[in-house]
Each structure stands twice: as C-alpha cells, then as structure tokens.
Amino acid sequence: MGLTKILPSSLPASPSDLRSRLSNPGASTYIFFIVDDDPATGKPWCPDVRAALPVVTKFFEGHPELDVSVVSVGSRAEWRDQNNVWRTKWGIHAVPTLVRYTLVADGKGDDGISQAQLVEEDAAREDKLAAFVKGA
C-alpha cells in the first residue's frame, strides 16, 4: 500500500465500482486528484496542487498502511471542460481533492460506497489532513 501514482485508465468507470479495492465493510481507499504538469515549468499547472502535493506526499509516506492512489485530472483545458469524466462521474469539482472512499454495509447484504472529500487549500494543511484521515 502507500502512495501510488496511477493512470486514469486504471480506475473503474465510477466510484461505485471501487468495491473490488475494498475488502470488507469499513475498509477505505483514498484517491488524490491532482493535475498534469505544465510542459513549460515541469510543475503542476494549478498553484493549489503545487502547495498540497508535498504535504500530502509526506503525510502518506508516514502512513504506509493506508491505500492512496494519485491520479491526474489532466491539463488545464481538459479540467475546464465541464463534461469531463472527473466532474460528471466522480464528483470532483475542484483540485486538488483528496477523497476517502469507504465500503459501507446496509445490514441487508447490499454494500455501498461512501465518500468524504478534503478540497483545495485544506489538502495543504497537515492538521486538516490528519483530522480527515482520523475521521475514517
């Protein structure tokens, strides 16, 4: 486990299809949605991502027991498209966004996925990040 950068194509079509990554009710996985690097600078084009990325990376390196995937929502033009898959299927409306997906049981054998989000500048605050993870 730990922090792993993955290709968007390796994710399922939507969060409801994450069940295969979650072993039992109460199990969680995290996905950190960031942006592509700007070709001119070699750094993320979004200033909030530039600020949050080192904080999130350091935090999760200290928590190797947690499953965390990092995925890019794309270039500035791709992200600004209101019909992109991250907005329409995944409910991501700002970057960076750290999402905790948790398998929940309804007691009738029908498991679902709940989600909580830590968004934009809050992802760059270690205190908020620690509280978010502790709230799992």
Image (spheres, rainbow, N blue to C red):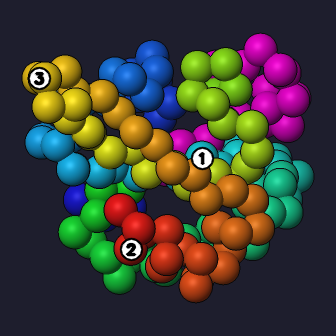
Graded by Cα atoms within 10 Å as few (under 14), some (14 to 19) or many (20 or more), the crowding at tag 2 reads few
Is disc 3 in contact with disc 1, using a CB cutoff of under 8 Å? no
Residue wearing tag 1: 33
Q: Residue at x 26, y 72 (%)?
A: 64
- Classed neighbour count for the residue bearing mark 3: other residues with Cα under 10 Å, few (<14), some (14–19), many (≥20): few
Q: Judge whether residue 79 can be spotted in this image.
A: yes
User: Nearer the viewer's eye, disc 3 or disc 2?
Assistant: 3
Check disc 1 and give the amino acid type. Phe
Residue that numbered label 3 is attached to? 109
The mark tally for this picture is 3
Crowd tier of the residue under label 1, counting other residues whose Cα lies within 10 Å: few below 14, some 14–19, many 20 or above? many
* Residue at x 87%, y 29% (from the top left corner): 80
Q: Which of 97 and 116 is in front in this view?
A: 116
Q: Where is residue 94 in the image (x, y as percent from the top left)?
A: 76, 45
Q: Do the residues labelled 2 and 1 touch (CB within 8 Å)?
A: no
Q: Name the residue under label 2.
A: 134
Does 43 appear above or below 60? above
Q: Is residue 74 magenta?
A: yes
**Magenta-tinted stretch:** 70-85
Q: In which quarter of the image is residue 126?
A: bottom right
- Residue 87 within the segment the image draws in magenta: no
Give the quadrant of residue 21: top left
Three-letter amino acid code at the position of disc 3: Gly
Front-lying residue, 107 or 119: 107
Seen in the picture, residue 134 relative to 114 is either above or below; the reply is: below
Q: Which of marks 2 and 1 is in front?
A: 2
**Residue 66, percent from left and from top:** 28, 64
